[in-house]
Amino acid sequence: MIWPGALVNCALFNTLHKNYGKRDRKHISRQKFFGIVLLCSFTWYWLPGYLFTALSMFNWICWIAPTDPTVNALFGTSSGLGLGILTFDWSMVSFLGSPLVTPVGYHLPQLPGSLTLLSI
Amino acid sequence: MVDRNEYYRCNGILPLDCYAHSLLFVPANSIIVILDNSRVINVSVTNTFFSKFMPISTFEVFDNTGMPYNASAIITNGEFDESKYLAYSPVFLPAARVVTIGGQFAAFTAIIVHTFREFAPFSLRSPLLMTLAVWYRRDIVRRFRGHLKDEPDVHSRLMQAYAEVPGWWYGLLGSIALILLISAIEVFPTKFPIWAALVAFGVGTIFSIPIAMITAITNQQIGLNVMAEVMGGYLLPGRPVANMIFKAVLFVTVMQAVAFSGQLKLGHYMKIPPRTMFAVQCVAVFVLCVVATGTQQWMFANVIDYCSADQPSGFICPDTFTFATSSLIWGGIGSQRTFSPGAMYVPSFSSHLLF
């Protein structure tokens, strides 16, 4: 039992503290890189989170036929099965905790399930 | 950047897991994933449980006219009113919700079988269970008896330099919390008996072990909220507020225990002394209690129309709303009228027999 969630934090702390106080050559410092990424993610979130919320659930199939019940049942996100949806909002992807944390061995069993459903 | 499988998981194929933290991620149960998905479509297409009259997957539950169920119509002074219920309507669940609840029932029994299988009576040890079960029982017993010295890895060897937290620290802290809980439910008019608090606490304690193990291996948390609602509905019929507290105590016990062990593991990896970790957690919880309660009080006092459906700044509290409505429904109408033999949703309940 290795707690994948704890490993992510460990990796972050280790990375940030590895060269603490030393000067890095040939690349920007780790702290600076972290700061830039943080700033970008903060800035980006204003777009799907506030300015253009349709980016969160980019439900283009429902936009083609907004009044068709079958289309909405299959492709709608809020009240349908949500097939083939697209999102530009990381907070939607990591709704149940970040997917990058979960080991790939526990992702893979979901694949046959999804494919079987698609073929029905 | 987006992992493709994962992307389907949360926004695509399986929206019901996103809503209910269902069982679909228990390792070795991938077959159930397939079954569950086709069952949503099956239930919907065949109009089982009248689900054609409702959206296929939504949070709300419905009455016999196809409108969202008005839970306050069956309540008098915070208690379930049978005459009002008979005059109004039984409760109808959308297809995805039925299957999700069935899934949670299945998960509930599955995790017991999965972890404590050796305690099961002989009749349950069928070949099917043998293939499904992973035997963790010996592992649990060994960890409880064992010591850090028995662990061969580098982290454990390094951590031996620090003093362990004695067991009675946890015992003391737990007793203080339990006393606070009991006095809170006694001081306020909750109609929640002390024995129910102890039952919820006990069930939560037992279930934190398997759920923490599953989280530690797969990083997926199995939600017990539906199970807690139904269990509370059987134990305390007709008392919505008591049902809500039962659910909160059981659920929060499990969630906090799991989160706490995860953080101790982080401290283990980062070589933080266990006693420091313990102290940090206590201080953080204390600060959090004060800040969270203060913020809540401030918002109730200062935000106009807080938690009403047309709040101008969007403070419509959907989470709290669902939490309260489902308690009204399971605690008020009660599990008896929904899941017991003779009621409509028996097939959903019986899905726990899968294991």
Image (cartoon, coloured by chain):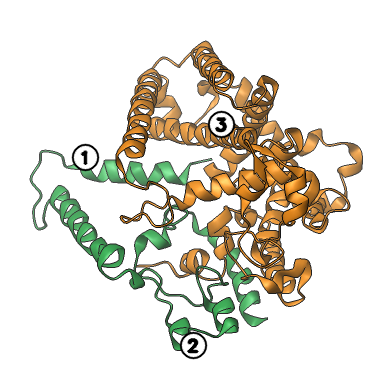
Which quarter shows the N terminus of chain B?
bottom left
Quarter of the image holding residue B171? Answer: top right
Q: Nearer the viewer, residue B259 or A75?
A: A75
What crowding class fits label 1: few (fewer than 14 Cα within 10 Å), some (14-19), or many (20 or more)? few
* Image mark 3: chain: B
| Residue of label 3 | B253
Residue B117 % position (x, y): 77, 39
Q: Residue at x 57, y 66 (%)?
A: B14
Task: Give yes or no for contact between labels 3 and 1 (Cβ–Cβ under 8 Å).
Answer: no
Q: Quadrant of residue B187?
A: top right
Q: Can you give x and y, in whole percent of width and height, for residue B164 in the image?
A: 45, 16
Measure how far apart labels 3 and 2 are at the Cα level: 46 Å
Read off the chain for label 2.
A
**C-alpha distance separating marks 1 and 2:** 53 Å
Q: Is residue B304 left or right of residue B230?
A: left
Q: Residue at x 51, y 23 (%)?
A: B148
- The residue wearing badge 2 is A65
The chain assigned the colour green in the figure is: A
Q: B155 or A53, which lies in front?
A: A53
Q: Amino acid at mark 3?
A: Thr
Instruction: Please tell me whether mark 2 sits on a helix, a strand or a loop.
Output: loop
Q: Is residue A67 above or below residue A58?
A: below
Disc 1 and disc 2 on one polypeptide chain: yes
Residue B3 drawn at (x, y percent): 42, 66
Q: Which residue is mark 1?
A: A17
